[in-house]
Amino acid sequence: MTKSPKLIFLVAALSILVALSTYAQINNVLIFKTSFPFYAGNAKMPAGEYRVTQPDANAPVLLIESESGSHSAFVDFNPTTSEQPHPQSDVTFNKYGGVDFLNLLWVQEQNYGMQVLTTKHEESLAKTATVQKHTVPIKSGK
């Protein structure tokens, strides 16, 4: 009989994990354009237009791919929420000196976003420079 409470707890914990992983998902392709190079995870991306997709709806991973297909990176993210729906879809970057890092994606009219995990390189720069956050609108997608 002691296995029953453990089993119930395990099933409940797994249900919560599945719910959280499906909470922040991209249902369509998000497209944004930058006039500056940036890091997506450990990959340095040149200025240009990018598509963001979530290849597996059950995994907290995004694919960031240049419109030409010449540059791409997979980045891990944590779902994040806000109390109010986000007024527009946008991408937030963290800038340290002259180096930009992909940080956060918000989807219009949704209470959720996708917080890109920081890399060791970004953490290193954050120790010596003040972060400046700036956003770029998402051209399409919802």
Image: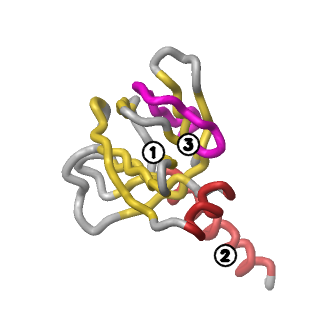
What's the mark number on residue 25? 1
Q: Relative to 50, does residue 95 appear above or below in the rendering? A: below
* Label 3 residue SS: strand
> Residue at horizontal 60%, vertical 48%?
76
User: Which amino acid does the dot numbered 3 rest on?
Assistant: Tyr
- The reply to whether the C-beta atoms of the residues labelled 2 and 3 are less than 8 Å apart is no
> Residue at horizontal 49%, vertical 24%?
66
Along the line of sight, which residue is nearer the eye, 9 or 30?
Answer: 30
Instruction: Kindly tell me whether residue 59 is visible in this rendering.
Output: no
Percent from the top left, x then y, of residue 22?
50, 50
> Which span of residues is magenta-colored?
40-59
Callout in the foreground (1, 2):
1
Q: Relative to 31, does residue 99 appear above or below in the rendering? A: below
Measured Cα–Cα span from mark 1 to mark 3:
21 Å
Q: Earlier in the sequence, mark 1 or mark 2?
A: 2
Q: How is the image coloured?
A: secondary structure
Q: Quadrant of the C terminus?
A: top left
Whether 120 is among the magenta residues is no
Tell which residue pokes out farthest to the bottom in this image. Answer: 2
What's the mark number on residue 39? 3
Q: Quadrant of the N terminus?
A: bottom right
